[in-house]
Structure formats: C-alpha cells, structure tokens
Amino acid sequence: METITTTPSSQTEISAVDALWALIQRQTKAVRKELTQRLLAEQDSTKAQQKMVKESLTRAFNQLHAGKVNHDARNLFAE
C-alpha cells in the first residue's frame, strides 16, 4: 500500500479584487472589451444621476434662499 503525505497549506489570503482580476485576465479580448464597455456605461449612468441630484439640490437651495420655500417635500424637485 502506498503512503500519501500531505503538507500543511500556507493559507494565503487572496482578495476578491485580485481573484476577479485573475479571472478577467484569462478572458478573451472580446470579453474584456465588453466588460470594459459595461463598466464605462455604468459609470456614465452614475455620473448622470449625480448631475441630476446636483441640479435638483441647487434648484431647491436657490428657491430656499429666494424665500420660495415649498413646504410640501413631494413637490420640492418638481419642474
């Protein structure tokens, strides 16, 4: 009968980002390109949402400073 010897593992921690990066690097160029396009689209969407919030808050604060306070918060950002 053959004896099997085992060695203790070093239990090196790998971060989620490093693991994901390793997976991405092994993908085809077409897949990496599609992932890049999706990430950029998501970033553009986030920037558009941030711009909308900024504009809405600017409008609301301008109304507040001009004395046009709308006490009904449901209509605070209405055009």
Image: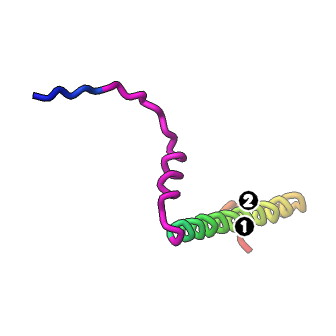
Of badges 2 and 1, nearer the viewer stands 1
Q: Which residue is mark 2?
A: 71
Q: Is residue 16 visible?
A: yes
- Toward the left, the furthest residue is 1
Rendered view: 15 above or below 44: above
The quarter of the displayed image where residue 50 is located: bottom right
Q: Residues within 10 Å of mark 1 (few under 14, many from 20)?
A: few
Please tell me which residue is depicted at 81% across the width and 65% down the height of the picture. 59
Rendered view: 2 above or below 79: above
Please tell me which residue is depicted at 52% across the width and 57% down the height of the picture. 25
Report the amino acid beneath label 2.
His
Please tell me which residue is depicted at 53% across the width and 69% down the height of the picture. 29
Rendered view: 50 above or below 10: below
In the image shown, does 27 or 37 lie closer to the viewer?
27
Please provide percent x and percent y for residue 47.
70, 64
In the image shown, does 43 or 53 lie closer to the viewer?
43
Residue 62 falls within the magenta-colored stretch: no
Is 59 on the left-hand or right-hand side of 12? right
Q: Residues within 10 Å of mark 2 (few under 14, many from 20)?
A: few
Residue 19 falls within the magenta-colored stretch: yes
Please provide percent x and percent y for residue 26.
48, 58
Instruction: Report the magenta residues as a range.
Output: 7-30
| Secondary element at tag 2 | loop
Report the amino acid beneath label 1.
Met
Q: Quadrant of the N terminus?
A: top left
Please tell me which residue is depicted at 53% across the width and 46% down the height of the picture. 18
| Secondary element at tag 1 | helix
- Toward the bottom, the furthest residue is 79
Is 32 on the left-hand or right-hand side of 50? left
Q: Which residue is mark 1?
A: 52
Q: Is residue 76 visible?
A: no
Is 28 on the left-hand or right-hand side of 56? left
